């Protein structure tokens, strides 16, 4: 089975000139004071939108924003996204107050060749996340052709990623979706050695990916708060650090994999600890976390060891911060990883908002092989799981 792409759609007889093309994009950008505060995902969607406009398509964009849970909530409106998209495209972007219904259909019908319309938040309707067939058919009525360019939601079987495909005359993958699949595939078939660098708060959030990557990787380097659960599993002191007591046995099971394979698991050898996990709290670097102190970041010795492993790797996959990244004093380990991957000679793939934020904050994006726009989707894909939004597009080769 194969996924047809935008090249095939534009190459086929007739192309898309004059046709309404429904583009499921991932425009789930942070909004502050009524404006987009980080347009990374918007910029990632631009190549597909521009190619369709240049081909004379009438582009109907759809996305979710936040988690309104099936209710219309003004703070989750996509109107600020339409305004920022217009600035990035250098062309007007229309906005429909709903994603289905007579108003949306009239707005789509009034488009001319090369025009762009953004529909209101898909998740204002419960039918989106429920993959309701009636809602999927209502979405399909605003367009003739379907393009999925939202890798960040490809792991969700929603109406706009799965249900609508059965209603569309043509359904293909956009440039961003195809690029994500191509780059993340190198983690499934890597140039070795493969180093997987995983951070974040909870073992429970990443247990499945830890176990899956343990079967593929040559080395796992673990940071963030979940490292303290692993240290507890080894009998190491963790002070007042965040530990998932109910996941200690799971951590022991992952650690046991090193006894039956060539897998190396790297854990912090030193730590930045604080009296409180708050900005301005007194900190120190220690090898063993003392009672009452909280681990807030990996220490400099650990950062150097993880950086060395990155330089020696043929492929590095990184997801999750090494410390409490939101507080500047606790972000040094995460930033050290960003620099290490930028300097590493092998293939580097980064996913997850905080990891990418660290890369972008340091201006290192051009030195990373691939920055993935889909945190959860990228984790599921590198586990080898089927992504419903991709499977829905598959057709006989």
Image: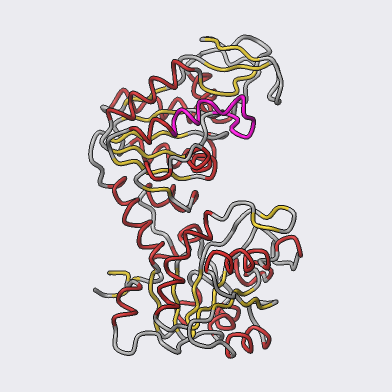
Residue 339, given in percent of the width and then of the height, sits at 42, 31
Is the residue 386 above or below the residue 148 in the image? above
| Magenta span includes 281 | no
In this rendered view, identify the residue nearer to me: 7 or 72. Answer: 7
> Which of the image's four quarters has the C terminus?
bottom left
Identify the image quadrant of residue 99: bottom right
Residue under the point 26% across and 43% down: 190
Is the residue 43 above or below the residue 264 in the image? below
> In the displayed image of the protein, which residue is found farthest to the front?
90
Residue under the point 70% across and 25% down: 279
Residue 356, given in percent of the width and then of the height, sits at 49, 43
Q: Is residue 156 left or right of residue 314?
A: right
**Chain part drawn in magenta:** 323-338
Q: Is residue 7 left or right of residue 135?
A: left
| Magenta span includes 328 | yes
In this rendered view, identify the residue nearer to me: 16 or 197. Answer: 16
The secondary structure that dominates the magenta segment is helix
Residue under the point 25% across and 33% down: 193
Q: Is residue 133 left or right of residue 374?
A: right
Q: Is residue 17 left or right of residue 345?
A: right
């Amino acid at each position: 089975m194969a996924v047809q792409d935008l090249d095939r759609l534009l190459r086929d007889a007739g192309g898309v000139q004059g046709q309404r093309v429904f583009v499921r994009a991932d425009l789930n950008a942070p909004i502050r004071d009524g404006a987009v505060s980080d347009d990374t995902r918007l910029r990632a969607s631009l190549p597909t939108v521009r190619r369709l406009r240049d081909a004379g398509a009438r582009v109907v964009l759809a996305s979710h924003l936040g988690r309104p849970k099936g209710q219309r909530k003004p703070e989750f409106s996509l109107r600020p996204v339409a305004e920022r998209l217009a600035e990035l495209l250098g062309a007007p972007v229309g906005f429909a107050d709903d994603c289905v219904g007579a108003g949306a259909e009239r707005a789509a019908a009034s488009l001319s060749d090369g025009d762009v319309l953004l529909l209101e938040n898909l998740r204002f309707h419960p039918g989106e996340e429920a993959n309701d067939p009636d809602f999927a058919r209502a979405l399909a009525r605003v367009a003739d052709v379907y393009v999925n360019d939202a890798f960040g939601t490809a792991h969700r079987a929603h109406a706009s990623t799965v249900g609508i495909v059965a209603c569309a005359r043509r359904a293909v993958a956009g440039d961003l979706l195809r690029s994500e699949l191509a780059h993340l595939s190198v983690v499934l078939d890597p140039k070795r050695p493969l180093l997987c660098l995983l951070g974040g708060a909870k073992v429970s959030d990443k247990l499945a990916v830890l176990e899956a990557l343990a079967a593929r990787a040559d080395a796992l380097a673990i940071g963030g708060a979940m490292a303290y659960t692993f240290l507890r599993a080894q009998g190491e002191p963790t002070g007042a650090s965040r530990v998932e007591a109910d996941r200690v046995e799971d951590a022991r099971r992952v650690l046991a994999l090193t006894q039956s394979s060539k897998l190396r698991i790297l854990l912090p050898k030193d730590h930045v600890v604080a009296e409180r996990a708050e900005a301005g709290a007194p900190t120190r670097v220690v090898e063993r976390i003392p009672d009452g102190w909280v681990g807030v970041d990996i220490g400099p010795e650990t950062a150097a060891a993880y950086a060395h492993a990155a330089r020696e790797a043929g492929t590095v996959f990184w997801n999750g911060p090494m410390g409490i990244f939101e507080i500047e004093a606790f972000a040094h380990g995460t930033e050290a990883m960003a620099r290490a991957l930028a300097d590493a000679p092998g293939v580097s793939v980064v996913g997850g908002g905080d990891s990418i934020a660290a890369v972008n904050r340091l201006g290192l994006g051009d030195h990373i092989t691939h920055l993935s726009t889909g945190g959860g989707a990228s984790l599921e894909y590198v586990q080898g799981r089927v992504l419903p939004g991709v499977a829905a597009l598959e057709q006989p080769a």
